[in-house]
Amino acid sequence: MRSPKSFKAEQLGLPFDKPGLLAGVDEAGRGPLAGPVVAAAVILDELAPIKGLADSKTLSARRRERLFDEIRARALCCSIASASVEEIDRLNILQATMLAMKRAVEGLRILPHHVVVDGNRVPVLAMPVVALVKGDSKLAAISAASILAKVQRDRWCEELHAAHPQYGFATHKGYPTPEHLAALQAHGPCAVHRSSFAPVRAATRLPVDLS
């Protein structure tokens, strides 16, 4: 698999008519039944490229962890933010994801001139922003953002597993796997489950085994 290039807007056909710093943005956690949605924004240093950047889903957990530390140390600037379970249930998952992305960009200590977001929807920002489908495999800054968001959320799941091992969060990371759905039926939802998601609503109506 070919690694994404350090960005040149014209190479990807991005509609930016002026040069300037670019931030890549991606999220982790739209599909799970529990926990926050996490977003990251990264401005890479083109003079110090980071080897091995790729879509976080294609990397091993160990490789993601190593790259997480390298990105935090070598990027010009990076920021990680989230939207809570309460915000997801109140706004819906799409709007909560846009909110997390907006917070990540606004959390950068150096504001970018341009922002490129993985996918096909973008948050409302103060600077030009475009969507790039499969951007996490095309643009190094988005790849870096995908790694930061994924590792941060996976770490949250590990902590949650320690507190609530009956749900198996360390294994499924909150996604609706058969194991997770069975745990929901056996134990009912906990406080970090997204009550607006159908499997959680269904489990809420089930009698909870307290034995």
Image: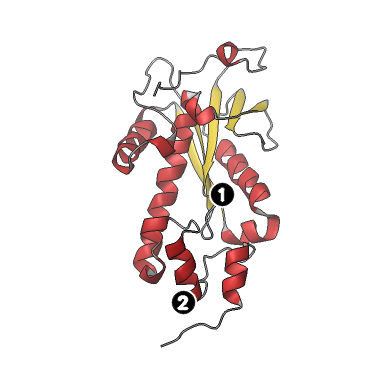
Binning the other alpha carbons within 10 Å of mark 1 as few (below 14), some (14 to 19) or many (20 upward) gives some
> Mark 1 is on which residue type?
Arg
Residue located beneath label 2 in the image:
186
Number of numbered discs present?
Answer: 2
Does the image show residue 33? Answer: yes
> What residue do we see at 68% from left, 34% from top?
125
Q: In this view, does 189 lie above or below 58?
A: below
Q: Position of residue 30 (x, y in %)?
A: 56, 49
Q: In this view, does 179 lie above or below 79?
A: below
Q: Position of residue 181 (x, y in %)?
A: 49, 66
Q: Which-is-in-front pick, marks 2 and 1? A: 2
Residue located beneath label 1 in the image:
30
N-terminal-most mark, 2 or 1: 1
Distance in Å between CA atoms under marks 2 and 1: 24 Å
Pointer 2 and pointer 1: residues touching (CB < 8 Å)? no
> What residue do we see at 62% from left, 69% from top?
201
Q: Is residue 188 above or below residue 120?
A: below
Q: Position of residue 35 (x, y in %)?
A: 51, 58
Does the image show residue 43? Answer: no
Q: Nearer the viewer, residue 77 or 174?
A: 174
Q: Quick one: SS at disc 2?
A: helix
